[in-house]
Amino acid sequence: MRRKAFDAANRVAQEKLREEFAGKTRKPLRPYAEAKRRRVAIDFRAQDLATPAFTGRKVLRDTKLADIARYIDWTFLFTAWELKGTFPAILDDPVYGDAARDLFHNARALLKRIVDGKLLSPRAVYGFWPATAQGDDVVLFADDDSGREVARFPMLRQQGAPDDATPNRSLADFVAPQDSGLDDYVGAFAVTCGHGLDALVAEFERDHDDYSAILAKALADRLAEAYASLLHQRVRREWGFGGKEDLDPEGLASEKHRGIRPAFGYPACPDHSPKQDLFALLRADEVELSLTESFAMLPAASVSGLYFAHPKAHYFHLGQIDKDQVEDYARRRGADVATVERWLAPSLRYER
């Protein structure tokens, strides 16, 4: 009897889960044309648009590992080891504390070895370009006068309709539109702390020390993210609005500052393929950064993306989109619909 009762209850529970999942997939989407009309309403004013200290690109090869290490957000190291909690509280967690303290001790010891021995070689390339929004495209120009286009980044737009008051966001909303007559700028960057990692990992693997090999890769990833945070701080100062920031590394990690640095492949812009245009703009090959056929960065311990400086720029999640936007995006990307559907598969509302 108990088995029959359990089976019946389990079937009811599973049906409820199926209904809830179906409900999520049935959440309404706005037509793309309507979503574009419901863009983030920003009254662009000249006083809100910062002018950077230079335009074009710069290469950095002399940033010290010790300076980068100060900006490590350790929480994500524990997450990689499936230890749930935020740093430093996780060190005293009643469940994960012992394992977290052991991991932290080993990580700091290996980090010291890496820093003291200069075992990794940080490299970065970044810059600023005059920019405008043309519809949902962010367009970058060589300079303020020639009008010569050097990069175009078609952006995606939310189509979800949670309520009438919520706009449908796109990263293009945070750049002054073409008809505003205002001078605006967008930045771009790519950083890596992966050069030298293969040799270090190979050394551990020769010694059959898989734990240290994995830890080295995780630390290189943390250092790359830390370098991105450190560089963004520099960028905000060179853009003229970050000079008065008084933020320690923890404050920077919690993004208590003006400006965002979204990366292609992440929530607001889940398509990885624009990294091709980003790397071409930055000439990232000059710092030995490249892409695989599937747009993964090499070395793997690397971070890249765009900088947006408007005071109202913020991160958001694209959510699901419909075929009307996919077709428009394919046209703007100069790609066929089937290819774009493959790039954006996790974001599609419909079955391909």
Image (tube, helix red, strand yellow):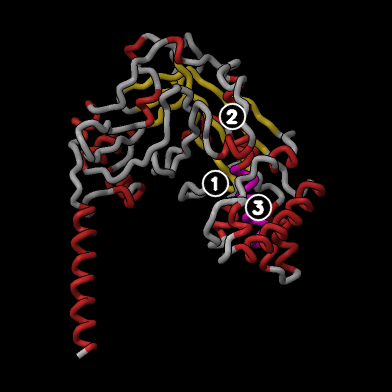
Q: Which residues are magenta?
A: 214-225
Q: In terms of depth relative to the viewer, which is nearer, 305 or 141?
A: 305
Specify the label residue 297 is tagged with: 1
Amino acid carrying label 2: it is Tyr
Specify the label residue 54 is tagged with: none
- Name the residue rendered at 50%, 16% in the picture: 50
Where does residue 302 sit, x and y in percent of width and height?
Answer: 59, 44
In the rendered image, which quarter contains the N terminus? bottom left
Q: Is residue 223 magenta?
A: yes
Q: Nearer the viewer, mark 1 or mark 3?
A: 3
Specify the label residue 219 is tagged with: 3
Answer with the quarter of the image where residue 78 lies.
bottom right
From the image, give the main secondary structure of the stretch colored magenta. Answer: helix
Gap between marks 1 and 2 measured at Cα: 16 Å
Cβ–Cβ below 8 Å for labels 1 and 2? no
Where does residue 276 sit, x and y in percent of width and height?
Answer: 47, 38
Q: Is residue 258 left or right of residue 196?
A: left
Gap between marks 2 and 3 measured at Cα: 23 Å
